[in-house]
């Protein structure tokens, strides 16, 4: 009888030594980070602006939504699909850089350049068509004729 308690404690402590190791933690993407994976889905245009003289002025967008599926960016006017272009996001840059391409392989010339950021649950893209020399450098000091579209995720 006097050996039962020590024997039970020995059994309990012995089983703890063989407990499974905790699973490794997944790297969490910060909430404000934007990557091609986190940008997938359908987005509603909340606001469209154009940079002029150091100011952002309201601009009437010719599209109401965009859909990002894999590397495809498709413009929509309500439910009607429009032009599809191909994209790549370089999330190692701050702010992240987005390129538009005419072909899926991204071997052709860049057809448009942009900055992209997540802000307060929305996504902002400052873009214009043309090559790398047309890329805006910051959201705070945009050159003239850069479109800034603010998007809200639909699903």
Image (spheres, rainbow, N blue to C red):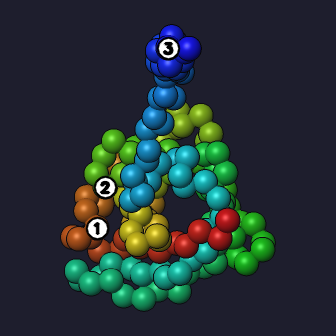
Q: Is residue 149 visible?
A: no
- Classed neighbour count for the residue bearing mark 3: other residues with Cα under 10 Å, few (<14), some (14–19), many (≥20): few
Mark 1 and mark 2: Cα distance apart in space: 8 Å
Q: Disc 2 or 3, which lies upstream in sequence?
A: 3
SS of the residue under disc 2: loop
SS of the residue under disc 3: loop
- Mark 2 vs mark 3, foreground winner is 3
In the picture of the structure, the residue carrying the numbered disc 1 is: 139
In the picture of the structure, the residue carrying the numbered disc 2 is: 95
Mark 2 and mark 3: Cα distance apart in space: 70 Å
Place residue 55 in its image quadrant. Answer: bottom left
Residue drawn where x is 53% and y is 52% of the image: 38
Pick the quarter of the image with the N terminus: top right
- Classed neighbour count for the residue bearing mark 2: other residues with Cα under 10 Å, few (<14), some (14–19), many (≥20): some
Q: Disc 3 or 1, which lies upstream in sequence?
A: 3
Q: Are marks 1 and 2 in contact (CB under 8 Å)?
A: yes
Q: Disc 1 or 2, which lies upstream in sequence?
A: 2
Mark 3 and mark 1: Cα distance apart in space: 76 Å
- Mark 3 vs mark 1, foreground winner is 3
Q: Which mark is residue 129?
A: none
Residue 32: image location, x then y, percent:
39, 59
Q: Can you say whether 124 is above or below 115 in the image?
A: below
Residue 81: image location, x then y, percent:
75, 66
For this rendering, which residue is in front, 141 or 3? 3
SS of the residue under disc 1: loop
Q: Which mark is residue 2?
A: 3
């Amino acid at each position: 009888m006097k050996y039962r308690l020590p024997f039970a404690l020995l059994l309990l402590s012995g089983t703890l030594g063989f407990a499974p190791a905790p699973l490794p933690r997944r790297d969490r993407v910060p909430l404000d980070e934007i990557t091609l994976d986190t940008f997938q889905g359908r987005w509603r245009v909340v606001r469209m602006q154009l940079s002029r003289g150091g100011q952002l002025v309201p601009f009437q967008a010719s599209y109401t939504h965009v859909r990002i599926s894999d590397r495809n960016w498709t413009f929509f006017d309500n439910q009607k699909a429009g032009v599809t272009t191909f994209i790549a996001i370089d999330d190692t840059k701050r702010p992240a850089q987005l390129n538009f391409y005419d072909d899926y392989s991204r071997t052709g010339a860049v057809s448009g350049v942009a900055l992209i950021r997540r802000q307060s649950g929305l996504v902002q893209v400052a873009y214009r068509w043309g090559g790398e020399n047309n890329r805006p450098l910051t959201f705070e000091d945009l050159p003239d004729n850069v479109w800034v579209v603010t998007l809200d995720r639909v699903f």
